[in-house]
Amino acid sequence: MPLPSVSFEFFPPQSLDASFRLWETVQVLAPLAPAFVSVTYGAGGTTRRLTHEAVAAIGTHYGLNVAAHLTCVDATRDETLAIAASYAEAGVREIVALRGDAPKGAVRFTPHPEGFAHSVELIEALAATGRFTIRVGAYPEPHPDAADPLADVRWLKRKIEAGASSAITQFFFEAETFFRFRDACAREGIEAPIIPGILPIQSWEGARRFAARCGAKVPAWLDEAFAAARRDRREELLATALATELCSELIEGGVEHLHFYTLNRPHLTREVCHALGITPKAALQKVA
């Protein structure tokens, strides 16, 4: 069975220690030859400048294909498109276009009066520039704002029709969750690749908080498994085994690409890739 291609998500550092952790993450994972790496915005677009700096540095110094996140949060249309133009000038050719989460303290997303109302408008504007490959987010389980179970599928179709070429899902805990979503998308006529997002569990408590925010269902058996692993001090071993098994099931189900949410902690992601047979292609050659 062919090995899948992989990609990794990083987030921009907000302190000196975090900066060291980001560059360690890049150096550990770059030899696995990712198809692309993505760099996030902070909640509410709070790391806009830091994201731009990290995107430029990773692309320039490590020669990786970087997909920069871009959101609709707290910016006018002109400001958002100016950020996109600055990415293009830095050599970025891929954007992950997202609506974005509500700013800190806000209950729901509210568009800027002169900004993009939602992700479809942003995608249309980016596509009109002709400068980018556009990736988008997808929710295999209902987004907290979704009106009904099929709303996320229909909205994804609109994003693809607006100019996106592929979608990356929010993380999930069971392969069947992804397969159900993929099948629903196929029934709606979505033909663009849907890439599963994988979260190697660095902290079970943290993963549970993430899940609550994005609507990911937590199976009861996982709570029990991590409680037992904590007693035996084998949480990392369990996390590696679970992520490897999830990825293996996805590959057996026809998935050709895996996107890892690294949280800037690379070692668990690397171990999972190695367990799948994805090993370094060559020593990392840092570009001067």
Image (tube, grey):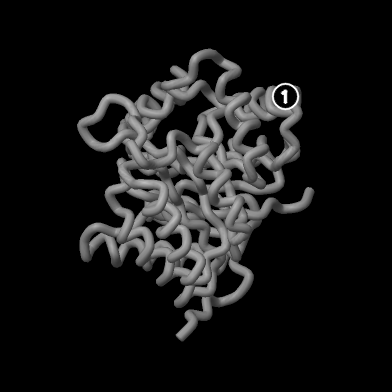
Q: Which image quarter holds the C terminus?
A: bottom left
- Residue under the point 41% across and 62% down: 25
Residue hosting label 1: 188
The correct choice, above or below, for 60 with respect to 133 in the image is below
Estimate the x, y position of residue 17 in percent, counting from the top left: 23, 63
Q: Classify mark 1: helix, strand or loop.
A: loop
Outermost bottom residue: 288
Of residues 53 and 264, the one nearer the viewer is 53
Within the image, what quadrant is residue 278 found in?
bottom right
User: How many neighbours does mark 1 have within 10 angstroms: few (below 14), some (14-19), or many (20 or more)?
Assistant: some
Outermost right residue: 1
The correct choice, above or below, for 69 with respect to 183 in the image is below
> Can residue 102 be seen by looking at this rendering?
yes
- Residue under the point 41% across and 71% down: 57
Total numbered circles: 1
- Residue under the point 57% across and 63% down: 93
User: Which three-letter amino acid code belongs to the residue tagged 1?
Assistant: Glu
Estimate the x, y position of residue 72 in percent, counting from the top left: 40, 42
- Residue under the point 56% across and 15% down: 149
Outermost top residue: 148
